[in-house]
Amino acid sequence: MAKDPICGMRVEKATALKSELGGQTYYFCSENCQRTFESQQAG
């Protein structure tokens, strides 16, 4: 299991959406959380 860095929800790594940044993989419960994370990282 992993924790969505935006909403804090616990997600299954095998089925969650994911993004990689700085050699680390982040897992998300939804496309909305993934987009929010990516836009925050973009500046």
Image (tube, helix red, strand yellow):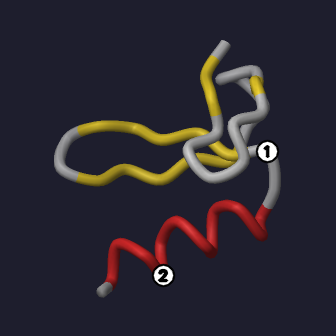
The quarter of the image holding the N terminus is: top right
The image shows residue 42 at horizontal and vertical percentages of 33, 83
The image shows residue 12 at horizontal and vertical percentages of 75, 21
Local packing at callout 2 (Cα closer than 10 Å; few below 14, some 14-19, many 20+) is few
Q: Is residue 11 above or below residue 18?
A: above
| Cα–Cα span, label 1 and label 2 | 16 Å
Q: Is residue 25 above or below residue 13?
A: below
Local packing at callout 1 (Cα closer than 10 Å; few below 14, some 14-19, many 20+) is many
The front one of 13 and 38 is 38
In the picture, the disc for residue 39 is 2
Q: Amino acid at mark 1?
A: Cys
SS assignment at label 1: loop
SS assignment at label 2: helix
Image-quadrant location for residue 27: top right
Looking at the image, residue 15 sits to the left or right of residue 4; the answer is right
In the picture, the disc for residue 38 is none
Q: Residue furthest top?
A: 1
The image shows residue 2 at horizontal and vertical percentages of 61, 21
Image-quadrant location for residue 11: top right
In the picture, the disc for residue 29 is 1
Q: Amino acid at mark 2?
A: Ser
The residue sitting at 81% across, 55% down in the picture is 30
The image shows residue 22 at horizontal and vertical percentages of 18, 50
Q: Residue furthest left?
A: 22
Looking at the image, residue 4 sits to the left or right of residue 5; the answer is right
The residue sitting at 62% across, 28% down in the picture is 3
Looking at the image, residue 25 sits to the left or right of residue 18; the answer is left
The residue sitting at 70% across, 61% down in the picture is 33
Of callouts 1 and 2, the N-terminal one? 1
Report if the CB atoms under discs 1 and 2 are less than 8 Å apart: no
Looking at the image, residue 31 sits to the left or right of residue 18; the answer is right
Q: Is residue 43 above or below residue 32?
A: below
